[in-house]
C-alpha cells in the first residue's frame, strides 16, 4: 500500500497557489462543503487474498465521508478521494521546507470496503447544484508514533485536508481552496488503535 507522498513546494508557494486559484469560481462564498467523521484507527483486515496488515508504527485511519455538497458552487466538482490527505509533517520536516513535507493520502484500493461490506469512496463528477450523500469510507495509512509531536492524549485525532492543486500532484499545491470541512465527531472524542478493523463502528 502507498503510505505517503512528499510535497515539493514551500509554504510561500502554497499560499501563492491558493491565491492564483481563488478566481476559478469556488470561494468562501461559493464553497463545496465536505462533511465527514473519523471512525477510528485499526491495524489489520482480512481480504480473500489474505490479511492486509499496517506497517510497524502505522495504522489504518478510517474516515466516513458523509456528504459532498456542491449546491453553492457554480460549476461541477471533480471529486477524487485520492486527494484527501492527513499532514503528518514533523516539526523538523517543516523546517526543511520543500523536502520535508509528509502528506499521507487516501488509499484508493476498494478492498477495504469489500472486506468490511461497506461502500468505499470512489471518483464522482458532482454537478453544480447537486449534493452527493454517503460518499463512503476512506482509509489512510498513517504513522501512529506521533511524528508531529501533538499532545499524546490527542495523537490519534486526524484532520482531513483536500489537495485542490493541479491534476499532477506536486506541480501546484493548494490545500482545501474553496472547500469547507464539517467534522461531525463530538468534541472531546478520543481514539485508540485497535487490532481488527471489524471492531470499528462502520455505520
Image (cartoon, rainbow, N blue to C red):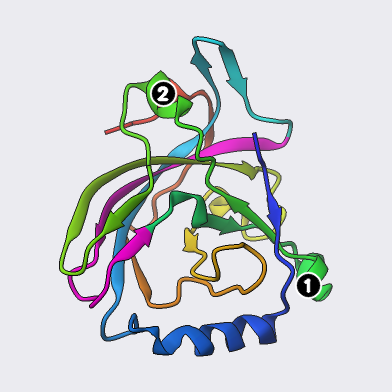
Mark 1 and mark 2: span between their CA atoms? 38 Å
Judged from the image, the secondary structure of the residue bearing numbered disc 2 is: helix
CB atoms of marks 1 and 2 within 8 Å:
no
Residue 58 lies within the magenta run: yes
* Magenta stretch, residue numbers: 57-78
Q: Residue at x 58, y 15 (%)?
A: 51
Main SS category, magenta section = strand
Disc number lying in front (1 or 2): 1
Q: Residue at x 20, y 75 (%)?
A: 72
Quadrant showing the N terminus? top right
Give whichever of 63, 91 is nearer the camera: 63
Name the residue beneath numbered marker 1: 98
Can residue 48 be seen here? The reply is: yes
Q: Position of residue 2 (x, y in %)?
A: 66, 40
Disc 1 residue crowd, few under 14, some 14–19, many 20+, Cα 10 Å: some
Q: Nearer the viewer, residue 59 or 97?
A: 97
**Residue 105 among those drawn in magenta:** no
Residue 159 vs residue 126, the one in the foreground = 126
- Give residue 68's position: percent from left, percent from top: 27, 58
Residue 69: name its quadrant. bottom left
Quadrant location of the C terminus in the rendered image: top left
Q: Which mark is residue 10?
A: none
Relative to 16, say whether 133 is above or below: above
**Residue located at (26% from left, 81% from top):** 30
Kindly indicate the quadrant of the structure image that contains residue 74: bottom left
Q: Position of residue 159 (x, y in %)?
A: 48, 59
> Which residue is identified by label 2?
199
Amino acid at each position: 500500500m502507498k503510505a505517503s507522498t512528499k510535497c515539493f513546494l514551500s509554504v510561500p508557494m502554497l499560499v501563492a497557489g491558493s491565491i492564483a486559484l481563488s478566481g476559478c469560481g469556488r470561494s468562501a462564498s461559493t464553497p463545496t462543503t465536505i462533511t465527514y467523521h473519523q471512525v477510528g484507527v485499526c491495524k489489520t483486515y482480512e481480504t480473500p487474498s489474505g490479511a492486509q496488515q499496517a506497517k510497524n508504527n502505522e495504522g489504518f485511519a478510517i474516515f466516513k465521508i458523509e456528504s459532498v455538497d456542491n449546491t453553492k458552487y457554480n460549476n461541477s466538482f471533480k471529486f477524487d478521494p485520492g486527494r484527501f490527505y492527513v499532514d503528518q509533517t514533523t516539526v523538523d520536516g517543516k523546517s526543511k521546507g520543500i523536502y520535508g513535507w509528509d502528506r499521507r493520502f487516501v488509499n484508493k484500493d476498494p478492498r477495504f470496503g469489500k472486506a468490511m461490506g461497506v461502500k468505499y469512496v470512489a471518483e464522482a463528477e458532482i454537478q453544480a447544484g447537486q449534493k452527493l450523500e454517503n460518499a463512503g469510507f476512506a482509509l489512510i495509512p498513517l504513522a501512529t508514533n506521533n511524528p508531529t509531536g501533538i499532545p499524546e492524549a490527542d495523537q490519534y485525532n486526524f484532520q482531513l485536508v483536500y489537495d485542490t492543486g493541479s491534476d499532477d500532484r506536486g506541480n501546484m499545491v493548494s490545500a482545501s481552496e474553496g472547500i469547507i470541512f464539517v467534522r461531525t465527531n463530538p468534541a472531546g472524542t478520543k481514539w485508540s488503535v485497535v487490532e481488527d478493523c471489524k471492531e470499528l463502528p462502520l455505520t
